[in-house]
Amino acid sequence: MAMKQPHVVIFPFPLQGHMKPLLCLAELLCHAGLHVTYVNTHQTHERLANLQALSTHFPTLHFESISDGFPDDHPRTMNLEFFITFKKSIRPHFRELLKTISLKAESNDALVPPPSCIMTDGLVTFAFDVAEELGLPILSYNVPCPRYLWTCLCLPKLIEDGQLPFQDDDMTVEITGVPGMEGLLYRQDLPGFCLVKEADHPALQFFMNETQILKRASALILDTVYELDAPFLSHMALIFPKIYTLGPLHSLLNSQIGDVSRGLASHGSLWKSDLNCMTWLDSQSSRSVIYVSFGTLVHLTRDQVIEFWYGLVNSGHPFLWVMRSDTTSGGPQIPAELESGTKERGYIVNWVSQEEVLTHKSVGGFLTHSGWNSTLESIVSGLPMICWPNLGDHHIVCRTVCQKWKIGLQLNENCDRSNIESMIRTLMGPKREEIQSSMDAVSKLARDSVAKGGSSHNNLEQLIEYIRNLRD
Ligand code: UDP
């Protein structure tokens, strides 16, 4: 019986924000009986928590790891050079793995069928060549906010129209010509590689071309709620033969599989969660705590850390702040002389189980970098946000959150302690009711979409059907 099931090979880009949603999707596919091979690089494989427990729970979930082609001690800094080299250096290892999996499947006693398709995220574009060479369909899972993807897909047109690159420094000019995003896209929302002076700039060319490769996918999978993004999804549907919106994916997983995988501490995490902070949260009063996390890619200067520290302490609210050891470069993150103040009111941790923190009754607001995963998690939990966007899709997410959905407040880029303090007081005080009421409406849409009969729930069923039919 299991032999007849399709086999999906999933390859996430080796970053936390990419690995967890694709692991959620892998579990959902296995829950429906499909075989999934989830491919890590050696570096992430060693760190990803609970692989053994997950394989035990989902017998059709298999893990493999390959070399990314870099020496072990390479810093793997996410810059243009890394992306270009990674693309070339990992390709032969991935091709080799696919051949090995197919060979194994040919043996008489094989329990796992040959791959039916490849599912990768938008940064793993080299997989398109490999899939096409081996005659396998490729499905593209897009990790960033779909509005960002849509903007990147429209870049050639923006260049053609003369909107990009721009020569003056007025960042408040609206970008027009991205259908469905009217009034919601300004120069300041564009990612860094668009803020260059020449159209043939290597970074602009590289990322623009990478996005165009995605058009070769047989289907596009988006971590969003159809009802929230319908205005531009209808335009994207003219480019992609099939689009499946499955978001919020972590919530879809929870709604279909209950708390099974959440019961595994640090599910899908590269870091180990501090569980004591949950006990600390239990001791705080309802909706009083501000949770602070800037995700896994944002780096703060020492001065910014200190401004945030004062802003948080002076706000008078208890705070739970995720600060990994690599958040700032060099030196202690919170100067020793300030730590006693932290003890009175705050709790600083290396890593938490964020989904659990966001649903804790003591947490009343989320100071975030506007990463797409964090934003979706906040929406599902109905938690208003203060947005401090930094890179990539963050600015587009922030604009949508603050201006369209009105479920958060934006913190200026050049934040100082008094600004941070007043923003927290505003979110937790006079503005709370108004923002909470918008959030409740958006949150309901998201939760309804993953429930039986909802758009994401239905789309998952259709995606599974689509994958089953790929073999015929
Ligand atoms: N996260 C977590 N614990 C933490 C901090 C972050 O589990 O202490 C998770 C968070 O739940 C989210 C991911 O890390 O799923 C961060 O992804 P996001 O897209 O928000 O930001 P990125 O790190 O990609 O910039």
Image (spheres, helix red, strand yellow):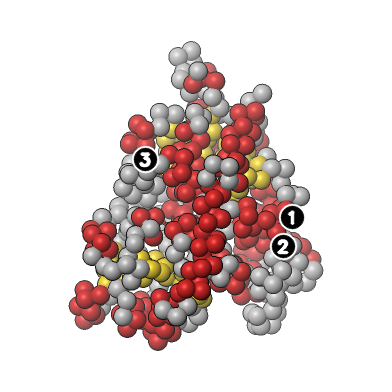
Q: Earlier in the sequence, mark 1 or mark 2?
A: 2
| Label 1 packing within 10 angstroms: few (<14), some (14-19), many (20+) | some
The percent position of residue 160, horizontal first and vertical second, equals 79, 66
Q: Nearer the viewer, residue 6 or 70?
A: 6
Asked if the residue at tag 2 contacts the one at tag 1, i.e. Cβ–Cβ closer than 8 Å, the answer is: yes
User: Can residue 26 be spotted in the picture?
Assistant: no
Q: Which residue is mark 1?
A: 235
Horizontal relation, residue 188 to residue 364: left or right: right
Q: Which residue is mark 3?
A: 260
Q: Residue at x 40, y 28 (%)?
A: 59
Q: Amino acid at mark 2?
A: Gly
Horizontal relation, residue 360 to residue 150: left or right: left
Q: Which mark is residue 180?
A: 2
Label 1 SS = helix
How many numbered dots are placed on residues in this image? Answer: 3
The percent position of residue 413, horizontal first and vertical second, equals 50, 79
